[in-house]
Each structure stands twice: as C-alpha cells, then as structure tokens.
Amino acid sequence: MPTHLIEFTKEGSVQASTDESVLEASLAAGIPLYHACGAKGKCSTCRVLIHEGADHLTPPTDPELALGERMHFPPNVRLACQTRVTGGPVRLSRILRDESDMSLYVGPFAGAATQQIGEERELTLLFLDIRNFTPLIERYLAFDVIHIIRKLFTTFQEVIEEHAGRIVETAGDGIYAAFGFESDLASGAAAAVKASFAILERLREMNDSYFRVHFNHRVQIGIGIHLGNVIMGGIRVAGSDHLLIMGYPVNIAARLQDATKQLNNNLVVSAELFSYLDQTAYAHTEDSVDLKGVSGSFRVILLGTAYLRASHLENPSD
Ligand code: FES
C-alpha cells in the first residue's frame, strides 16, 4: 500500500497509507488530534487547516459537507477523520491544540466568526472620530448624547455599507471600518475615499437641518485612511460574532485620524493610499506628519477641509 507524507506544522511528519484517514495516521504517529465523536464526522474536533497539498486529499464526504456547511468552514479546513491522502506532500496544522481550544470552536460559545481561520488580506482601513464631543456630553442629557451618536452612527454605517465597507468596531465617539473585502486594493481605497466624502456631505446636511436646529451644535468629524496587508479573523464576544482586523496599517490609519487635528483637515489619507487613486479627481494638498511608532516623517494627503473654529460656530464653546 503506497504511503504519503503529511507534515504537521511544528509537530512533525507522518506517513499515511491511502486506506487510512489523516486522523488514524496521525494518532498512530503520536500526534494527538481530538476526535470527540469517534471519527463519525459529527463533532468537528479533528479539524485541520490545510496549508499545502489540498489537491492530494480525497473530496469531502457527505458528513463533512453537512458539518462544514452548518459550521461555515472555509475550503482550507478539513475533517481529519473524513480525509485520506492520495498524493503528497501535504502540509497542515491542528486547529484544536488542547482542551481550552474546545470552547472556542465547539459548543454554545462557538459562533460563525470563530470558524473563520485568520487570513492575510490587503484592505483599506478607515478611522472616524467625532470632534469636540466632550462639550456635548457636558451640556446635554445622557438621552440626548446617545440619541446624537445613534443618529450619526446609523448614517455613517449606511454610507459605509453603500460603499461595500464593513464596520469593524465602534468605540465611544469613533468608528473603525474596512473596505475592499470583495475587490482589489485600488477599488477598496477608492471606495473608502468616496464613502468619506459621502459621510462628510451627509453630515453637512444633518448639521444644517437637524443638529444646528435642535441642539445649536455643528458636529465635526475627522477621518484618517491607510491601506495594506492585515490579518483578518473573527471572534465571539458576549454572544455575538465580531470581525477582527489587525496589523501595522491599522495603527497607521488610527494615527492619521488623530493627526487630522494637528493638520487641521477633516480627511487625511496616506500618500501610499493616494497613489492608488485617480489623483486628478481630487483637490488635494501634500503634507507630512510625525506619527508615533513611525520613523521619519510620514507623507500624507489632505483631501478634506479645515475645521471650523470656535468663532465660526453657532456656540463659541465648541
Ligand atoms: S472526530 Fe468528530 S468529526 Fe472527526
């Protein structure tokens, strides 16, 4: 019976014959894959992540297809108990490494988000923050403050989704969103910038027709945008699934949003992002700024307008 090589990342190699499952071969070689249902394709604890050699594996069995559909497995996740190796080499990793991993992936606390395997993606990251929100909190009732945030965030979310973006997080008076999930980097960058202009326009309308009328206040925001290679995955917190997008470009985008104050411009993008856009379509100014954690000056493009200062606002305390 021919055998083929299975390499478990950082754990060692296993020779598997074509008539035994990846689970059987691994257990025989001392690699402790979990198999709570006894290899019936029902528990998913034997799942492995395929890095290389997917073509050398037998197609998913009916139980594997059914479980994979129910648990939203990506194509590079296979059940070791249902899979045999027909060629080689195959490189893979265990997903559940000890008992503490069980609750992450199996049972009541596991959600669709945790079935997603972390992956590298090229995305555009947008950070938005409401300026001078503290005076509003001091001046208005808690109900009014929440009402204002709710009204603003609902509108911002609408615009972000209209441009195929997704909100990753909201924190206090800020939003973190990402673009380019279904497109290339250039299209994601263009979508994020278009969304930003649309948000600023919707905010102008809301200020004129609502916030100035009912709250004697003009809301101002700052937006910073950058792009690059990030790690994307999912996490389940307090019963809901959340998107996780992390990496150095995320920190840069957050710091660009912060730098909008110093640069006195409400829409600041990195020069790198701007290089992906049709530059003739945007009135812009170039500048540079020192960003925490970045050596040397960071080149930025100012696409927005200067903030209105207190003397230009309806209420000078703003
Ligand atoms: S051991 Fe349960 S699905 Fe493989």
Image: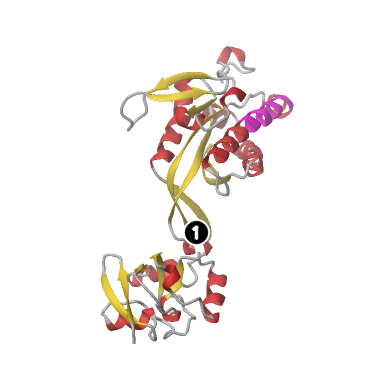
Q: Is residue 137 left or right of residue 88?
A: right
Residue 188 spot, x, y in % from top left: 56, 40
**Which residue in the structure is indicated by mark 1?**
238
> Any magenta on residue 202?
yes
Residue 54 spot, x, y in % from top left: 43, 68
Check the image and tell me how it is coloured.
secondary structure
Residue at 43% of width from left, 74% of height from top?
57
Residue at 46% of width from left, 27% of height from top?
271
> Any magenta on residue 80?
no
From the image, give the main secondary structure of the stretch colored magenta. Answer: helix
Quarter containing the N terminus: bottom left
Q: Is residue 293 left or right of residue 250?
A: left
Which stretch is magenta? Answer: 197-209
Residue 179 spot, x, y in % from top left: 55, 43
Q: Is residue 231 left or right of residue 69?
A: left
Residue 268 spot, x, y in % from top left: 50, 26
| Most foreground residue, 104 or 304 | 304
- Residue 220: quadrant of the picture: top right
Question: What secondary structure is found at the residue carrying circle 1?
Answer: loop
